[in-house]
Amino acid sequence: MTHPNFSIVTDPARTLIRVTMRGFWDAAAIEAYDVEIRKAAQQMSAAGCRPGDLVALVDTRELSTQSQDLLAVYKEQFGGADRQPRRLATIVSSALLKRQVERLAMPNQRLFQDEQAAMRWLFE
């Protein structure tokens, strides 16, 4: 699925959901993301992937820094344990975005600057 602010690719064989985030988000982008990430999780489940086995790679290298209000909405909507993969690797490219992602404090998340290192960690 591709949207101006994100793309989501599922890989059931590897129990992997890969997300690329772009630009500056607003409430409509969060709503669209919620709908599409739920669809992706349902696709993975239909392919035989159990929720507790899912891993996610989130690439934020094209993402702009976000407003504090938007970050609060994002954390409230996606921060619950029922919305988390087993492991969440987030690729960041700027110090400011890294600090924003760290403030979200998502469970089972680790931050990376290198995609290969992130993928190794996901599948350890």
Image (cartoon, grey):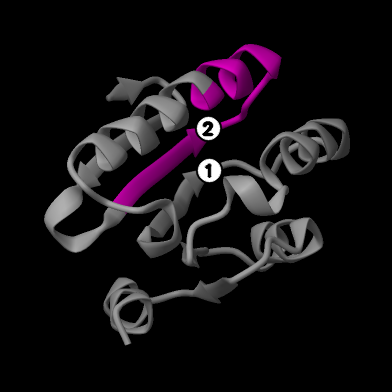
The quadrant in which residue 10 appears is: top left
Q: Which mark is residue 36?
A: none
> For residue 72, what is the image quadrant?
top right
Task: Inspect the magenta stretch and tell me whether residue 106 lies in it.
Answer: no
| Range drawn in magenta | 17-34
Residue of label 1 = 63
Circle on res. 23: 2
Q: Give left or right: position of 49 versus 38.
A: left
Give the Cα distance between marks 1 and 2. 5 Å
* Location of residue 78 in the rendering, given as x and y in whole percent from the top left corner: 66, 41
Say if 114 sits above or below 80 in the image: below
Q: Earlier in the sequence, mark 1 or mark 2?
A: 2
Residue type marked 2? Gly
- Check contact, mark 1 vs mark 2: CB within 8 A: yes
* The quadrant where residue 16 appears: bottom left
Which element type, helix, strand or loop, lies under badge 1? strand
